[in-house]
Amino acid sequence: MTVSQVPADFGVVYTWCAASVPPPDHTEYQITLNAAGQGEVIFWPDYPTSQTPCWREGFTCAPEVVQALYTLILEQGLLSRK
């Protein structure tokens, strides 16, 4: 499989939250990555509201890393499960 086989619309979004934890111990974060290898981590130190601070940090993955992730997803059948 080559890097060109990663579809242009490929993307991954991973979201995590600390369930029903009372403030100030609740945290949430989200990690995104697109086919071009551009990603972002977003962190909220509390339940998201208009008052909650939000920290964002961008990152870039090499094409080989995106390809490896896409290959793993295909091998595990994640795109073919109902």
Image: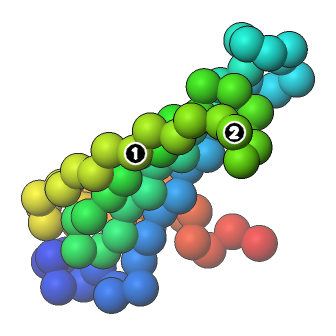
Q: Secondary structure at mark 2?
A: loop
In the figure, is residue 46 to the left or right of 15? Answer: right
What residue do we see at 32% from left, 57% from top? 39
**Which residue is under mark 1?**
56
Q: Secondary structure at mark 1?
A: strand
Residue 3 placement (x, y as % from top left) = 15, 76
Residue nearest the observer in this picture, 79 or 33 = 33
Q: Is residue 27 visible?
A: yes
**Residue 4 lies in quadrant:** bottom left
What residue do we see at 86% from left, 14% from top? 22
Residue 38, numbered label: none
Q: Is residue 72 visible?
A: no
Label 1 vs 2, first from the N-terminus: 2
Residue 52 placement (x, y as % from top left) = 66, 36
Q: Are marks 1 and 2 in contact (CB under 8 Å)?
A: no
In the figure, is residue 13 to the left or right of 16? Answer: left
Identify which amino acid the numbered label 1 is placed on. Answer: Arg
Quadrant (top left/top right/bottom left/bottom right) for the N terminus: bottom left
**What crowding class fits label 1: few (fewer than 14 Cα within 10 Å), some (14-19), or many (20 or more)?**
few
**Residue 7 versus residue 73 in the image, above or below:** below
What residue do we see at 47% from left, 44% from top? 42
Identify which amino acid the numbered label 2 is placed on. Answer: Gln
In the figure, is residue 63 to the left or right of 56? Answer: left
Residue 51, numbered label: 2
Front of the two marks 1 and 2? 2
Residue 81 placement (x, y as % from top left) = 69, 68
Residue nearest the observer in this picture, 56 or 60 = 56
Q: Find the distance from the CA under tag 1 to the CA under tag 2.
A: 16 Å
Report the colour scheme. Answer: rainbow
What residue do we see at 77% from left, 72% from top? 82
